[in-house]
Image (spheres, helix red, strand yellow):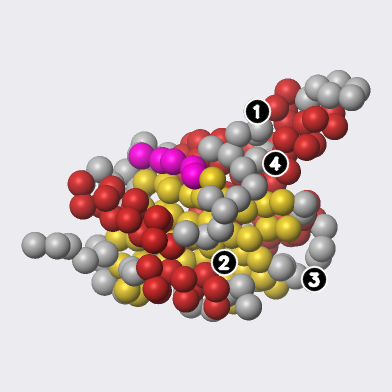
C-alpha cells in the first residue's frame, strides 16, 4: 500500500520578504544582501556566532531552516535535498577576486554549494541523507520523487527539500518540510503552485 506524504510547512525568502504557511514573518526594504541577512538574524534573535563567518548561500539556508525547525519538531534523520541554478557562483566570484591580493581561505571553504548542507546539519545536529543538485530551474517533479524515495525507503522520517538560489545579490529561497503528518498535499502541482505563487 502506497504511503501518502504531506508538506508539513514551508518557508519563502525573496525580495526582502519572508513568509511561511501561516503568514508573512518579516518584511524589509533593505536591498543590500549582507544587511538584509543581518537584520533577519537579529529579528530571529539567533545566538549562533558561526553564522557571521558563512557565505550568503549558507546564511540563507540557515535562516530558512531555522524558521521551519522552530515551528516544527524534527528528528536527526531529517534528510536535506536542495537545488539551485547558480551553484556557489556568488562565493566563487568573491574568492576569485580575493586571489588578486591574497586568496581568502575563509571564502574558499564555501566554493561548493553542498557546504550549506553541512552547515545546516551541524547547527541542527542532523545525521541524515543529503544532496545538493544543480538544475536549470525549480524542478518540482524531481524534488517530489527524490523526497518520496527517501521517505518510502525508510532512510528518513522527514525531508527538507527545495530551492536555494543566490546570484548577483538576488536570492530566491523556497523550502518545504515533508513528512507523513497530514497537512498540505505533497504533489508536483502543489509544489509548483506554492513556489510560483510566492514568486509573483
Q: Secondary structure at mark 1?
A: loop
Give the percent coordinates (x, y) of residue 53: 70, 37
- State the separation of the CA atoms marked 1 and 4: 13 Å
Q: In 3D space, how far apart are the residues under numbered discs 1 and 2 (Cα atoms)?
A: 26 Å
Query: Measured from the top left, where is residue 138 in percent x and y?
Result: 52, 60
Q: Which residue is mark 4?
A: 89
Looking at the image, is mark 1 or mark 4 nearer the viewer?
4
Q: In the rendered image, which residue does mark 2 sit on? A: 12
In the figure, is residue 165 to the left or right of 143? right
> Helix or strand or loop: what does disc 4 sit on?
helix
Q: Is residue 100 above or below residue 21?
A: above
x then y, percent, for residue 32: 82, 58
- Looking at the rendering, which quadrant does residue 77 occupy? top left
| Pick the front one: 133 or 53 | 133
Give the residue number, with chain letter if any, for mark 1: 109
* Residue 33 relative to residue 100: left or right: left
Crowd tier of the residue under label 2, counting other residues whose Cα lies within 10 Å: few below 14, some 14–19, many 20 or above: many
- Which residue shows up at 68% across the image and 58% down it? 171
Using the image, tell me which numbered label, if any, was put on residue 29.
3
Q: Is residue 122 visible?
A: yes
Q: Is residue 31 magenta?
A: no
Of the numbered discs 3 and 2, the one sitting upstream in the chain is 2
User: Between disc 1 and disc 3, whose residue precedes?
Assistant: 3
Name the mark on residue 131. Answer: none
User: On the picture, is 184 further left or further right than 68?
Assistant: left
Q: Residues within 10 Å of mark 3 (few under 14, many from 20)?
A: few
Q: Disc 2, disc 4: CB below 8 Å?
A: no
Q: Which residues are magenta?
A: 129-133
- For the residue labelled by badge 2, is the local secondary structure a helix, a strand or a loop? strand
Amino acid at each position: 500500500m502506497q504511503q501518502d506524504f504531506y508538506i508539513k510547512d514551508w518557508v519563502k525568502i525573496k525580495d526582502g520578504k519572508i513568509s511561511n504557511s501561516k503568514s508573512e514573518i518579516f518584511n524589509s526594504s533593505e536591498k543590500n544582501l549582507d544587511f538584509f541577512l543581518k537584520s533577519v538574524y537579529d529579528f530571529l534573535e539567533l545566538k549562533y556566532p558561526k553564522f557571521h563567518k558563512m557565505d550568503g548561500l549558507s546564511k540563507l539556508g540557515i535562516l530558512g531552516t531555522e524558521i521551519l525547525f522552530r515551528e516544527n519538531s524534527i528528528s536527526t534523520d531529517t534528510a536535506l535535498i536542495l537545488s539551485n541554478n547558480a551553484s556557489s557562483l556568488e562565493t566563487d566570484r568573491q574568492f576569485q577576486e580575493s586571489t588578486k591580493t591574497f586568496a581568502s581561505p575563509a571564502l574558499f571553504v564555501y566554493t561548493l554549494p553542498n557546504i550549506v548542507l553541512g552547515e545546516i546539519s551541524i547547527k541542527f545536529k542532523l545525521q541524515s541523507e543529503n544532496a545538493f543538485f544543480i538544475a536549470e530551474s525549480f524542478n518540482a517533479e524531481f524534488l517530489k520523487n527524490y523526497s518520496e524515495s527517501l521517505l518510502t525507503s525508510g532512510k528518513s522520517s522527514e525531508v527538507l527539500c527545495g530551492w536555494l538560489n543566490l546570484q548577483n545579490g538576488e536570492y530566491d529561497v523556497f523550502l518545504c518540510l515533508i513528512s507523513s503528518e497530514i497537512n498540505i498535499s505533497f504533489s508536483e502541482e502543489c509544489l509548483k503552485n506554492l513556489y510560483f505563487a510566492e514568486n509573483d
